[in-house]
Amino acid sequence: MSPLGRRRLLVGAAAIGAAGVAAAVGLPRLTSDDRPVALVYRGPAASPGCPEAVARLLESSPTPLRAVYVGPDEDTDVDADSLAGAVLYAQPGGGSLAPAWRHTRRYAPVLREWVGAGGTYLGFCLGAYLAGDDPGYGLLPGARVRQYISTDDATVHDESETVVAVTWRDQPRHMYFQDGTVFRARDDDWNALGATVLARYPNETVAAVVAPYGTGRVGLVGPHPEADESWYAPNLTNPDGIRFDLGHDLIETALMR
């Protein structure tokens, strides 16, 4: 979940250039741009570079989106006013759950209300942990969010950065991974929740899912479909190459009504 120090330096430097891709501007400046607004959290609950990678993924998606950073140190924070102007809110990866929750718990009521009324929440790794309820925003009722490396027959056993094999829509793929989530529904009956399972790990636990919450949707993924080349250490490669189609599938499925 928590990026290594080496990648912090790489993506921290790259984040300056990312401002041109998803400028950290307030919502009023978006009135001349007709792309739907996607809010991306950037603040102490996210690791450097993670919000920028999510923003790039959103802006390159088949559905044109305009990424806008929100957070305690941005021009706009996460509140009812900023959410009212957006179709999607994204919570990127970061450090550990407990300190992240201390930074974001005040957002829980407004996020639940907004998603329940038709908004779309995307959670990547830590953002997926935060969608749970112990602690978290409580956006995945009927299911639990847990740590993949703690599951039986997990193929990854520690929090080091690695590449994990998944089956995404019945196709074998590989994804950047660091202490990501697994999602468990009672009796693994996701149909009862009206959910779409996008990906499973080799032990058949769920790696990515899109589920309803009220009239809104929640898209969650344990690995990192937004990871670009800068995330990979010299001795770490993805057999599939650096591709973003899985992240785009997550976005498009979550936005589908």
Image (spheres, rainbow, N blue to C red):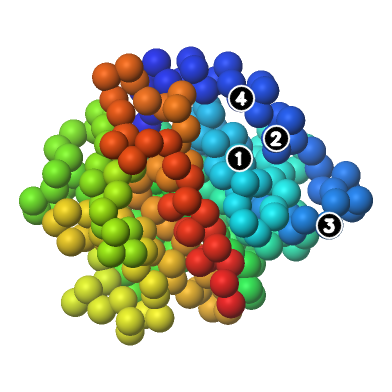
- Up/down of 48 relative to 98, above or below: above
Q: Which residue is mark 4?
A: 15
Q: Which residue is mark 2?
A: 21
Disc 1 packing (10 Å; few <14; some 14–19; many ≥20):
some
Q: Position of residue 216 (x, y in %)?
A: 57, 73
Q: Tag on residue 56?
A: 1
Distance between the Cα atoms at labels 3 and 4? 25 Å
Give whichever of 121, 14 is nearer the camera: 14
Q: Position of residue 249 (x, y in %)?
A: 48, 59
Earlier in the chain: of badge 4 and badge 1, it is 4
Earlier in the chain: of badge 3 and badge 1, it is 3
Q: Are marks 4 and 2 in contact (CB under 8 Å)?
A: no
Label 4 element class: helix
Foreground: disc 3 or disc 4: 3
x 65%, y 46%: residue: 59
Distance between the Cα atoms at labels 3 and 1? 18 Å
Residue kind at label 4, given as amino acid type: Ala
Q: Tag on residue 34?
A: 3
Disc 2 packing (10 Å; few <14; some 14–19; many ≥20):
some
The answer to whether one can see residue 180 in this image is no
Decide if residue 164 is on the left or right side of residue 5. Answer: left
Earlier in the chain: of badge 4 and badge 2, it is 4
Distance between the Cα atoms at labels 2 and 3? 16 Å
The answer to whether one can see residue 49 in this image is yes
Query: Picture quarter containing residue 145?
Result: bottom left
Earlier in the chain: of badge 2 and badge 3, it is 2
Query: Split into 4 quadrants, where in the image is the C terminus?
Result: bottom right
Label 3 element class: loop
Residue kind at label 3, given as amino acid type: Asp
